Image (cartoon, rainbow, N blue to C red):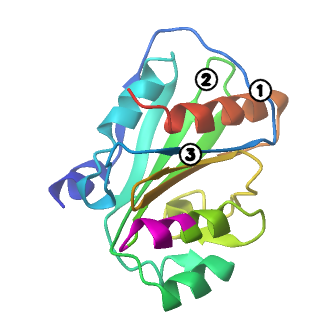
Amino acid sequence: MALALGLASGTSATGTSGSSSGTSGTYRTQDTAKNHKARDRNPAQLLSRLARQGLRVEQRFTSDDGDCVSHSYGLVREFVENQPCSALFRALFEVRDSRRAVVLVAVAWVDMPDARQAREFKDLVDGHGTGNITELSRESGPYRDVRFTGEHYASVLEDSTVINAQAQPVRATRAASDLAERLVSTALTPD
């Protein structure tokens, strides 16, 4: 994908609107039918949505490597070994707010062959401690030691596509935790 190559070097944006705060440690899931397929994913909308909140956003990496098995871990890996995905797109964003909190946001779009398998995948990936699609920060860049805990997580099911977002503070501060919780909600909110 040309988009993945063009943005891999780091795209950034800055916005100028207000903010809100959520409750830490919640998992949100929802079902929709908007047909946003992994193979058609354009992370520019997410980048813009975050920047409009007055945040400094840098897209660190994207990947359209469709191999879910080699880019997953835990029970999620076992699942996709037996029920392969049909497409995978991942993005990693570095987000900073005015309080100098730094949070990584990992988003994965996973297309499954049908809606039933997508529901089964979503049910599994939504369980805490079951594994996930590997965050791009684990594979390259300066944040390899940052581990996503799943504390700030949300997902949606769109027909046969599961989209999940995780946010992880780079340093454990109250400001970063507040920002992380806000970001998972924003990452999956449609424009």
Left or right, 93 with respect to 146, comes to left
Camera-side mark, 3 or 2 = 3
Q: Quadrant of residue 33?
A: top left
Question: Is any atom of residue 6 visible in this view?
Answer: yes
- Disc 3 residue type? Val
Residue holding disc 3 = 105
- Disc 2 residue type? Asp
Give the class, few, some or many, for how many residues have Cα within 10 Å of label 1's Cα (few <14, many ≥20): some
Camera-side mark, 3 or 1 = 3
Residue holding disc 1 = 175
Q: Residue furthest bottom?
A: 82
Local secondary structure at mark 2: loop
Which residue is at 64% across, 64% downward?
123
Give the class, few, some or many, for how many residues have Cα within 10 Å of label 3's Cα (few <14, many ≥20): many
Left or right, 42 with respect to 111, comes to left
Q: Quadrant of residue 42?
A: top left
* Of the pair 87 and 34, the residue shown nearer to us: 34
Give the class, few, some or many, for how many residues have Cα within 10 Å of label 2's Cα (few <14, many ≥20): some
Question: Is any atom of residue 138 visible in this view?
Answer: no
Residue holding disc 2 = 97
Magenta range is 113-119
Q: Quadrant of residue 161?
A: bottom left
Residue 191, position in %: x, y?
Answer: 38, 26
Local secondary structure at mark 1: helix
* Cβ atoms under marks 1 and 2 closer than 8 Å: yes
